Image: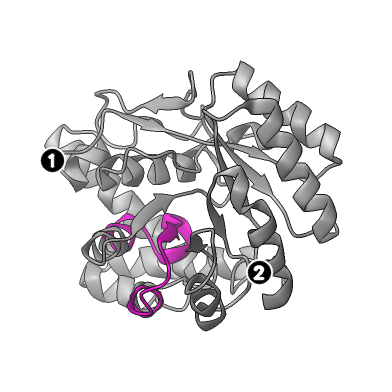
Amino acid sequence: PGWTPIGVEQANAMLRRAIAKVEEGRDFAEVLDELETSPEVRAGLSGAAADLAAHGQGLPLARSLDADSLETVAVNAVVGFGSPRQTVDAGLDAIQRGFSVIKMKVGVAAPDVDIERVAMMRTAVGANVELRLDANGAWDAPTARRVLESVAGFGIAFCEEPVAGIDAIADLGATSPVSVAIDESARTVEEVARALGTGSIDVVVIKPQSIGGPDLAMRAVRLTREFGATPIITTMIDSAIGVRHALHVAAASGVTLAHGLATSAMLAEDLADPPRVADGSIAIGVVPGLGGTPR
């Protein structure tokens, strides 16, 4: 709720109607087009079709999407909200588990607390760990500018959604000492294109499940690279099936930077065995399709 345009019951009904149309022999592309207003439902259906096609080719989904896909995908750890000391402890624990990239959630505490958290984290983890920030659009422009100017000296790779909205992020990015990334403010390929067209957004976070499936995610990936920006693939804290969709898109993107896929541990239960994270990366393997099936 709050992150998707429709609820579970409505999505389930739309999916069943779409499947019935496919079974009746309707053109599959037309069925997908009719799901434009519900990208999550479209993602489920197009993702299943992509999995089926990859099985038919005898290839992992990533290789089916792009023949030059990566064999392993680097992933970042996510450090949630907490006191500066709790944040540092979580970061050090992530390093102990093999992560070398940490994304810090910011924007809920007071700006000075966030600045302190970032400073303490950099001191604790040293210079070789990449730090990213994600404010989820929580700051207004003056606050975002003050925080980013204050933490710029700590070597921040980029900040996701420091403010909300394509124009606001682009305006900030034009003068920010820290690169800015767009995430939930650009949920369609068209919105990604508009964000990239501003020329001041360096990173585009792409969620296959919220953009409409692996086919549209790959379109956004290629568009982002054409503009000279960096695509980063993340989950929506999906089930193991959704995580695998994102994993294969990340591998197909060819981007060797860390992606936001290590989220399965946040779930109390799951629909399948999630991809295994080892030393900050996930191996694609050779199993056809997604490489996992629902229980």
Q: Residues within 10 Å of mark 1 (few under 14, many from 20)?
A: few
On the question of residue 244 being in view, the answer is: yes
Q: Is residue 204 magenta?
A: yes
Q: Which mark is residue 280?
A: none
Amino acid carrying mark 1 in the image: Ala
Region rendered in magenta? 193-218
Q: Is residue 198 magenta?
A: yes
Residue 295, percent across and down?
51, 31
Spatial distance from mark 1 to mark 2, Cα to Cα?
Answer: 41 Å
Which residue is painted at 66% across and 45% down in the image?
104
Q: Residues within 10 Å of mark 2 (few under 14, many from 20)?
A: some
**Residue assigned mark 1:** 67
Which residue is painted at 43% across and 68% down in the image?
201
- Which quarter of the picture shows residue 24? bottom left
Q: Quadrant of the N terminus?
A: bottom right
- Mark 2 falls on what kind of element? helix
- Which quarter of the picture shows residue 60? top left
Q: Which mark is residue 145?
A: 2
Is label 1 in contact with label 2 (beta carbons under 8 Å)? no
Which residue is painted at 34% across and 50% down in the image?
48
On the question of residue 135 being in view, the answer is: no
